[in-house]
């Protein structure tokens, strides 16, 4: 299972995009896929996909990066529970 941040393709009126979590589990034949909203809106120009952060040029970058960090921490805890067979795929989605 992978849970990664992604920017929704739709651009909002203020040129920001919604930050989502994409959950993928399984292989080609039995692949399950779901998307959960984080509630955060960011300017894609300042999104660092590799670091999963906004750069310091983004307005409110400290607040956004703190929120993103909390979501990433929760994501990692949920992945650990899934790997330990404590949560199912549906449990992961409900926990996010």
Image: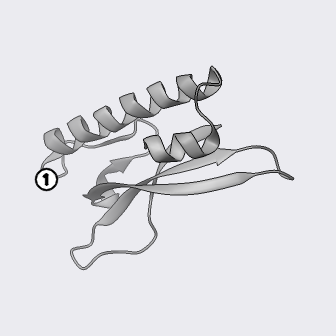
Q: How many marks?
A: 1
Residue 43 picture quarter: bottom left
Q: Position of residue 47 (x, y in %)?
A: 35, 50
Residue 96 picture quarter: top left
* Identity of the residue drawn at 58% across and 32% down: 87
Q: Position of residue 18 (x, y in %)?
A: 35, 62
44 and 65: which one is in front? Answer: 65
On screen, residue 25 above or below 86: below
* Identity of the residue drawn at 52% across and 47% down: 93
Q: Position of residue 3 (x, y in %)?
A: 54, 41
Q: Which residue is under mark 1?
A: 59
Judged left or right of residue 56, residue 36 is right
Figure quadrant of the N terminus: top right
Judged left or right of residue 86, residue 63 is left
SS at circle 1:
loop
**Residue reaching furthest bottom?**
13
């Amino acid at each position: 299972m992978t849970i990664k941040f992604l920017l929704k393709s739709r651009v909002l009126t203020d040129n920001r995009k919604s930050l989502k979590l994409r959950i993928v589990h399984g292989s080609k034949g039995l692949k399950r896929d779901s998307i959960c909203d984080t509630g955060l809106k960011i300017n894609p120009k300042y999104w660092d996909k590799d670091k999963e952060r906004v750069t310091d040029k983004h307005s409110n970058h400290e607040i956004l990066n703190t929120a993103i960090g909390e979501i990433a921490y929760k994501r990692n805890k949920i992945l650990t529970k899934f790997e330990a067979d404590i949560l199912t795929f549906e449990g992961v989605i409900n926990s996010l």
